[in-house]
Image (cartoon, helix red, strand yellow):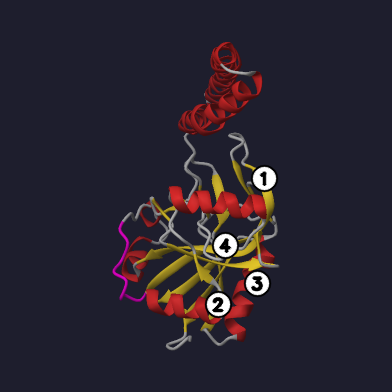
Amino acid sequence: MRLLKRFVQRLLIFGLGLFCIWLIVFVVFETADRRLPWILAVAVTYGLAAYIVLPRAIRIGLKILQSKRVPSYAITGDGLPGDPVNVVLVGTLQQLREAFAALGWSEADRLGLASSWGMVRAFVFNTPYPTAPFSTLYLFGRGQDIGFQRAIDNSPRKRHHIRFWALSQMRAQATWGTTEFWLNTERPPDNESVLWVGAGTRDTGLSLTRLSFQITHATDSDTVAEREYIVGELRKNRSIEAVKVYQAGENLLTERVNHYITDGEITLAILAANSA
């Protein structure tokens, strides 16, 4: 029965892939090609395929596969594995901001039309944008609550950065080890001492996302090294204390997540009372 189910799933995924190719090549491109110059037709086809057709096909495919794994990583808007979770800090929002400000890191702008256009210009002309926005990744049923970054060589193309999601400590204790742990859509109050669940990676340039081929930052695959860098900087500045290492989640793979190398470990630390 399991083999039959797997065969049907693969058959449906294969059929979905063929449908997408037909839709993109023989409907979208041919329609655009009849009405626009060839180069514009290609651009329009890419935009519709990468940002509308393929993301929706991916979501349908994931529903067909019905994955039940508890994640050890944030997910993209298309439901694909994103950055691995590798840091948890305990404290208030103010403590978190003070800790990264003391390191010279900038808080990321909210993603919007103005900030996105600013990021595009900075990326193309390689001009500094220290508060550049992040793409949205999801954990606990919502996008990141806050993010911090520090440019490398003053370039918008390369940067250390980390996204954080707030989780009530009481909620975490009550739901740890169950699927409810990952379904908390409510953000705790800013003045509450919470778990700041973070996913830190290092951007290295320009890339395309897997499957949907959207334009995005390329990232260094070694998220273990980036975790050690971030924790090391916070330690050196005495912004954290009581550092411990835990294994992420339960029954999780610890070799590769998407295109990342991760050991599946999370460093947890208490934010110092006065990080500034």
Q: Amino acid at mark 2?
A: Lys
**What stretch of residues is rendered in magenta?**
186-193
Q: Badge 1: how crowded within 10 Å, few (<14), some, or many (20+)?
A: some
Q: Which residue is mark 2?
A: 244
Residue 207, disc = 1
Residue 102, disc = none
Residue 228, disc = 3
In this view, the mark in front (4 or 2)? 4
Q: Which residue is mark 4?
A: 129
Q: Badge 2: how crowded within 10 Å, few (<14), some, or many (20+)?
A: few
In this view, the mark in front (3 or 2)? 3
The residue sitting at 56% across, 20% down in the picture is: 20
- Between 33 and 72, the residue placed more toward the observer is 33
N-term-proximal mark, 4 vs 2: 4
Image height check: is 143 above or below 154? Answer: above
In this view, the mark in front (2 or 1)? 1
N-term-proximal mark, 1 vs 4: 4
Q: CA distance from mark 3 to mark 4?
A: 25 Å
- State the image coordinates of residue 266 (x, y, percent, origin top left): 56, 67
Q: Is 188 covered by the magenta stretch? A: yes
